[in-house]
Image (tube, rainbow, N blue to C red):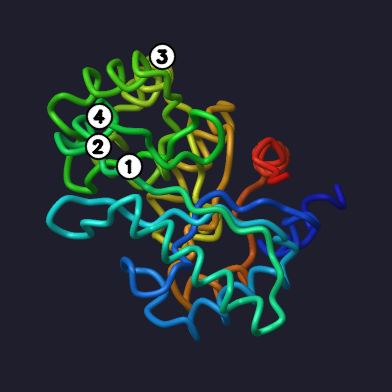
Amino acid sequence: MLNLFKSKPLLKDLIPDHHIDIHSHLLPGIDDGARTFEDTLRLTRALQSFGISQFITTPHIIQHVWDNTHEHILAKKTTTVLALEKNNVIVPLKAAAEYLMDDQFVRLFQSSDLLTLKDKYVLVEMSYINAPIQLYSILFDLQVAGYIPVLAHPERYLFYHNNFNEYLKLKRAGCLFQLNLLSVVGYYGAAITKTATELLQKGMYTYVGSDVHHDNHIAAFEQKVRLKDLKPLEEAIANNEFFKLE
């Protein structure tokens, strides 16, 4: 009976010590995340205060929007780590990428190595407007090339909300799901929180990510989690240990 009246925890309080964040936009001036190094420094320190000790940051690669090359991302990562160290922030930080699944992405993984989260695990996303026409062909070819797709924030693709079977189809096609942590506090709206809750209850998430871009995202970690059952979320959070940087 007492559990009915138990206060729901703040999101930040569910982040364990030494957590590995696998999705963020901390590199400055490279996409719609941190604009300046001062932003990077502030965001990194804030995430550290929640218990995050290792970062795999994932700038967007979107044709004609964020035309980031692997070389540019890695160079930016190197200068950012040096600047953080000069400010007494010593953290393991790896650069991967968040790839929009489009024709350019196919050409990229067929001709060169991708920037992965770990081994062959690659973070992918779709447009928020609609899924790519050749989605399942892309996923098939990606796996033939040896990669394991980790789909970023599936709960945010509104075009799937009224057809849950599409999520099941994605799982059967080999996608692992990554939950945006802010989805469970209502940051993106009630419909997205509802879908995230259902996906959690069905055990469909494997990993989580902060997807931090700016200060408003940091502030949302101070909000209460809108879940009745925390266990699936806690399990997905714990799974991020797989990406521990050596």
For the residues marked 1 and 4, what is the alpha-carbon distance in whole angstroms? 20 Å
Alpha carbon distance from label 3 to label 2: 18 Å
- Please provide percent x and percent y for residue 209: 54, 51
Q: Secondary structure at mark 2?
A: loop
Q: Earlier in the sequence, mark 1 or mark 2?
A: 2
Q: Judge by depth and name the residue closer to the eye, 3 or 85.
A: 85
Say which residue label 1 marks: 125
Q: Are marks 1 and 2 in contact (CB under 8 Å)?
A: yes
Horizontal arrangement in the rendering, residue 169 relative to residue 209 (left or right): left
In 3D space, how far apart are the residues under numbered discs 3 and 4 (Cα atoms)? 26 Å
Q: Position of residue 8 (x, y in %)?
A: 72, 59
Badge 3 element: helix
Q: Amino acid at mark 3?
A: Arg
Q: Earlier in the sequence, mark 2 or mark 4?
A: 2
Q: Secondary structure at mark 1?
A: strand
Which residue is drawn at the image coordinates 49% and 64% (left, top)? 212
Q: Residues within 10 Å of mark 3 (few under 14, many from 20)?
A: few
Q: Is residue 37 above or below residue 224?
A: below
Which residue is more in the foreground, 27 or 149? 27
Q: Which callout, 3 or 2, points at the residue further toward the start of the chain?
A: 2
According to the image, label 3 marks what residue? Answer: 172
Q: Earlier in the sequence, mark 1 or mark 4?
A: 4
Mark 3 or mark 4, whichever is nearer to me? 4
What's the amino acid at mark 1? Glu
Residue 128 point in image, percent of width and height: 24, 48
Mark 4 Cα shell of 10 Å, populated few (<14), some (14-19), many (≥20): few
* Image side of residue 17 versus residue 148, left or right: right
Which residue position is annotated with label 2?
A: 101
